[in-house]
C-alpha cells in the first residue's frame, strides 16, 4: 500500500490509477473532490460523536455523584428516624418517676 493514494489499496473501487503518461482528467478531479468531501463528512461525524460521548461521560459522572449523595442522605435520615422513633417510644412507655419529685412527693406509691 502506498501513501501517495491517500492510503487506498490499488484494488479498492475508490482508487482509479491514471495510465502512465496520461494527465488527470476532469472526471478524476471530480472523483477526488467527492472523495475529499465524503472524508470530511466522515471526519466531522466522528468529531461530533466523540464530543457527544465525552458529554455523555460527563453527565454520567455527575449523575453517579448525585446518586452517592442521595444514598448518604438517605442513610442519615434513616438513622435519625430510628433514633427519634426509639426515643419517643421510650418516653411514652417508661413510667414518669421524675413527675413526683417535682411535686414534692417522695414515695412512688403516692405519685401513682
Image (spheres, rainbow, N blue to C red):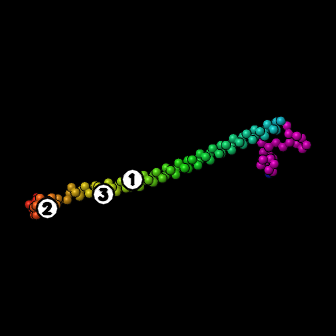
Instruction: In the rendered view, tell whether residue 90 sits above or below residue 6.
Output: below
Instruction: In the rendered view, tell whether residue 21 sits above or below residue 102.
Output: above
> In front: 21, or 83?
83
Q: Which mark is residue 111?
A: none
Q: Which x, y percent locates residue 30? A: 79, 36
The residue that mark 1 highlights is: 74
Q: Residue at x 20, y 57 (%)?
A: 93
Dot 2 crowding, Cα within 10 Å, few <14, some 14–19, many 20+: few
Disc count in the image?
3
Q: Which mark is residue 101?
A: 2
Is residue 82 located in the magenta-colored stretch of the structure? no
**What span is colored magenta in the figure?**
2-25
Calculate the distance from the C-alpha at mark 3 to the C-alpha at mark 2.
28 Å
SS at badge 3:
helix
Q: Nearer the viewer, mark 3 or mark 2?
A: 2
Q: Residue at x 77, y 42 (%)?
A: 14
SS at badge 1:
helix
Is residue 11 located in the magenta-colored stretch of the structure? yes
Q: Which circle's residue, 1 or 2, is located before the other in the chain?
A: 1
Label 3 with label 2: CB-CB less than 8 Å? no
Q: Which circle's residue, 3 or 1, is located before the other in the chain?
A: 1
Q: Residue at x 45, y 54 (%)?
A: 68
Calculate the distance from the C-alpha at mark 1 to the C-alpha at mark 2.
41 Å
> In front: 105, or 55?
105
When asked about the image quadrant of residue 18, the answer is top right
Q: Which x, y percent locates residue 24? A: 85, 39
When asked about the image quadrant of residue 78, the answer is bottom left
Q: Nearer the viewer, mark 1 or mark 2?
A: 2
Calculate the distance from the C-alpha at mark 3 to the C-alpha at mark 1.
14 Å
Q: Residue at x 67, y 43 (%)?
A: 44
Amino acid at each position: 500500500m502506498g501513501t501517495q493514494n491517500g492510503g487506498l489499496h490499488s484494488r479498492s473501487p475508490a482508487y482509479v490509477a491514471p495510465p502512465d503518461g496520461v494527465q488527470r482528467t476532469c472526471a478524476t478531479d471530480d472523483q477526488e473532490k467527492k472523495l475529499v468531501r465524503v472524508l470530511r463528512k466522515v471526519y466531522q461525524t466522528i468529531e461530533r460523536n466523540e464530543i457527544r460521548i465525552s458529554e455523555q461521560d460527563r453527565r454520567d459522572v455527575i449523575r453517579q455523584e448525585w446518586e452517592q449523595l442521595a444514598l448518604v442522605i438517605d442513610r442519615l435520615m434513616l438513622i435519625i428516624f430510628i433514633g427519634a422513633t426509639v426515643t419517643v417510644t421510650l418516653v411514652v412507655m417508661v413510667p414518669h418517676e421524675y413527675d413526683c419529685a417535682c411535686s414534692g412527693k417522695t414515695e412512688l406509691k403516692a405519685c401513682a
